[in-house]
Image: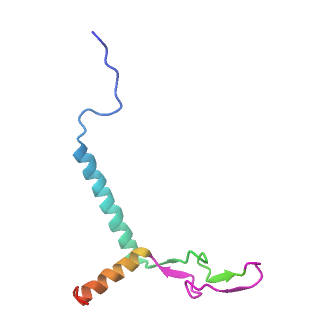
């Protein structure tokens, strides 16, 4: 009789259950992100890192950041998507 080697994968795993768990996890993460975008629509500006100031190349003088107009905050990408979908809904799909 030949001894069988142990395998790392379980024998009864169905690929459809793995895909279902992956899909459910993706949906939960997406809903959580959009909920965060709804509650906290603004994030730190990536150009000025939330300071609102843009330094000169030599480091002595500074001006206001052009991207955020000196506020240090910009709309998050998810909030832009939410606003676009809301505008489409308000217009009724017609232009």
**For the point 23% across and 88% down, which residue is it?**
94
Residue 82: quadrant of the picture = bottom left
**For the point 61% across and 78% down, which residue is it?**
48
Q: Which range of residues does the magenta coloring cover?
A: 57-76
Which one is in front, 16 or 29?
Answer: 16
Residue 87 in the image: state x and y as whole percent.
30, 86
Residue 28 in the image: state x and y as whole percent.
32, 62
Residue 74 on the magenta segment? yes
Residue 72: quadrant of the picture = bottom right
**For the point 31% across and 18% down, which residue is it?**
4
Q: Quadrant of the C terminus?
A: bottom left
Residue 60: quadrant of the picture = bottom right
Residue 31 in the image: state x and y as whole percent.
32, 67
Residue 73 in the image: state x and y as whole percent.
53, 81
Q: Residue furthest front?
A: 95
In this rendering, the count of numbered labels is: 0
Which one is in front, 6 or 39?
Answer: 6
36 lies left or right of 53: left
Asked if residue 30 is positioned above or below residue 37 in the image, the reply reads above
């Amino acid at each position: 009789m030949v001894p069988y080697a142990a395998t790392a994968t379980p024998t009864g795993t169905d690929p459809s259950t793995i895909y279902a768990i992956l899909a459910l996890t993706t949906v939960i993460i997406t809903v959580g992100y959009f909920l965060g975008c709804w509650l906290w629509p603004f994030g730190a500006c990536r150009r000025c890192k939330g300071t609102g100031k843009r330094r000169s190349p030599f480091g002595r003088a500074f001006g206001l950041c052009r991207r955020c107009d000196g506020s240090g905050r910009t709309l998050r990408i998810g909030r832009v998507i939410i606003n676009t979908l809301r505008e489409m809904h308000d217009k009724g799909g017609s232009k």
